[in-house]
Image (cartoon, helix red, strand yellow):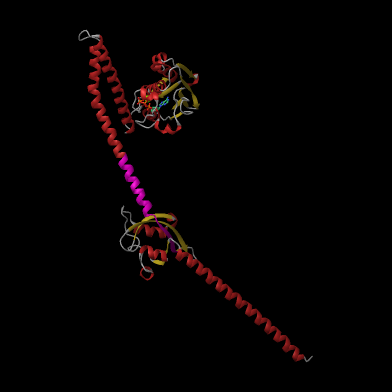
């Protein structure tokens, strides 16, 4: 073949190959461009359709991006808000509580990491105040300095209002409870004074110091004395409970032998147990030794527990006290009985003030429903715990309390 013909052929092939290469590169570029456009519109769609406020602001606080949701939410058109400062538009300079939001916005630009999650009050165009939970993220430029801040926000106004309502309700309840406690404390004091004289003089009369009495007069005086003492015990419980509730109860701490106190406590119900054929049992470990507590109050707790056990145990039943170390520096006392027990559905009434569970036995016995809540408070004041267990109605109860050992 002619030599020049060969040269032309080869150079044509080379040109063709180059053209194909250029064509391929061009196609790749177009594909990449389209992919970029698609992904950009996907992200735009995402940002515009998000049900969240999405905005960007520069280091001066001027808005550079404001998604559609934000425009609808705040009531600004894009053209009205882009380039405007957030302060004076969507952020008031101070919030209702007086916090300086102007300073906050400046600080976000310097320390965005401190504001990754931030809640603050914002302002709608129509003047309404709203609460928004924001997440903020710094956008850095090539030399790592902050260029813009991206903020995503969600309205939490309803949540905040509910929080405020709850707080108000809580304050109202607390103040009502304080009023109630101080009312009881004052009333109890006023009631105790005359009652002491009723009891005192019924005793003087009963001792026939003011003259000889007939059998019937003695019987009636007995009623006056018994009911007077019952009323006094009740008033004392109310007074104690109000004091404990108001945080005004003080403990008179002393060191004493808990085993002895528990044994003595049995004396409270010995007579009743005997007349009702109720068996008593004591199981007190030797190692419990001395405790530091308010002796009178622990006695009061034991009296409440044992008198309940006696009250709610039918004739012929059994009542017992058990005490042992439950942890290194804690003693656990249990007052148990095999009486009427507690139905699980009534369990929360046991430690609720002025609550009693209806039963044949409780109908016959007196009480106000203060013994257990008061005892629980007294034990808690000592740093201990009080709870109860019952297998159910008719299956007895076990009341426990713990006390820190000395
Ligand atoms: N050992 C028990 N067995 C069964 N039920 C009990 C026992 N102890 C308490 N309860 C139930 O818990 C309720 C509350 O007890 P709490 O001691 O507070 O009141 P109360 O004994 O009825 O009255 P108060 O102690 O004020 O005189 C009782 O009315 C009773 O229904
Ligand atoms: Mg009681």
The image position of residue 405, as x and y in percent, is 45, 25
The image position of residue 365, as x and y in percent, is 36, 22
Q: Is residue 301 visible?
A: no
In this picture, is 3 found above or below 288? below
Q: Report how many numbered discs are placed on residues in the image.
A: 0
- Residue 228 vs residue 135, the one in the foreground: 228
> Which residue sits at x=31%, y=42%?
171
In this picture, is 160 found above or below 341? below
Furthest toward the left, the residue is 210
Toward which corner of the image does residue 1 lie, by quadrant? bottom right
> Which residue sits at x=65%, y=79%?
21
- Residue 126 vs residue 355, the one in the foreground: 355
Is residue 47 covered in magenta? no
The image position of residue 195, as x and y in percent, is 24, 21
Toward which corner of the image does residue 202 lie, by quadrant? top left
* Extent of the magenta region: 147-173
Left or right position of 230 against 119: left
The image position of residue 139, as x and y in percent, is 47, 63
Q: Quadrant of ligand 1?
A: top left
Toward which corner of the image does residue 375 lie, by quadrant? top left
Image quarter in which the C terminus is found:
top left
Q: Is residue 343 visible?
A: yes
Is residue 148 covered in magenta? yes
> Which residue sits at x=34%, y=25%?
367
Furthest toward the top, the residue is 212
Furthest toward the right, the residue is 1
Q: Main secondary structure of the magenta part?
A: helix
């Amino acid at each position: 073949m002619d030599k020049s013909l060969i040269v032309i052929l080869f150079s044509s092939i080379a040109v063709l190959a180059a053209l194909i290469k250029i064509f391929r590169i061009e196609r790749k570029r177009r594909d990449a461009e389209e992919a970029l456009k698609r992904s950009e519109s996907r992200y735009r769609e995402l940002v515009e359709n998000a049900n969240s406020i999405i905005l960007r602001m520069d280091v001066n606080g001027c808005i550079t991006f404001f998604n559609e949701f934000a425009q609808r939410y705040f009531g600004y058109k894009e053209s009205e808000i882009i380039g405007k400062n957030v302060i004076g538009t969507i952020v008031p300079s101070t919030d209702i509580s007086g916090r300086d939001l102007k300073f906050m916005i400046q600080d976000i630009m310097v320390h965005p990491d401190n504001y990754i999650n931030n809640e603050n009050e914002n302002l709608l165009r129509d003047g309404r105040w709203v609460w928004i939970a924001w997440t903020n993220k710094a956008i850095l430029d090539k030399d790592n300095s902050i260029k813009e801040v991206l903020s995503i926000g969600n309205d939490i106004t309803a949540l905040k209002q509910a929080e405020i309502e709850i707080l108000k309700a809580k304050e109202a309840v607390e103040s009502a409870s304080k009023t109630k406690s101080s009312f009881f404390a004052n009333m109890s004091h006023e009631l105790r004074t005359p009652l002491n004289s009723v009891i005192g003089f019924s005793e003087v009369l009963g001792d026939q110091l003011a003259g000889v009495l007939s059998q019937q007069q003695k019987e009636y005086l007995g009623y006056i004395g018994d009911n007077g003492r019952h009323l006094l015990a009740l008033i004392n419980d109310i007074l104690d409970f109000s004091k404990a509730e108001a945080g005004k109860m003080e403990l008179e701490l002393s060191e004493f032998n808990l085993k002895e106190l528990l044994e003595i406590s049995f004396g409270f119900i010995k007579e009743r147990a005997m007349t009702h054929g109720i068996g008593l049992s004591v199981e007190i470990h030797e190692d419990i030794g001395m405790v530091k507590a308010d002796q009178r109050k622990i006695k009061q707790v034991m009296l409440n527990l044992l008198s309940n056990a006696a009250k709610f145990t039918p004739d012929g039943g059994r009542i017992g006290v058990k005490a042992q170390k439950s942890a290194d520096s804690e003693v656990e006392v249990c007052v148990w009985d095999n009486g009427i027990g507690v139905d699980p559905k009534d369990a929360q009434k046991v430690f609720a003030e002025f609550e009693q569970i209806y039963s044949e036995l409780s109908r016959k016995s007196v009480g106000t429903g203060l013994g257990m809540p008061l005892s629980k408070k007294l034990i808690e004041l000592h740093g201990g715990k009080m709870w109860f267990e019952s297998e159910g109605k008719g299956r007895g109860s076990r009341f426990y309390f713990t006390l820190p050992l000395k």
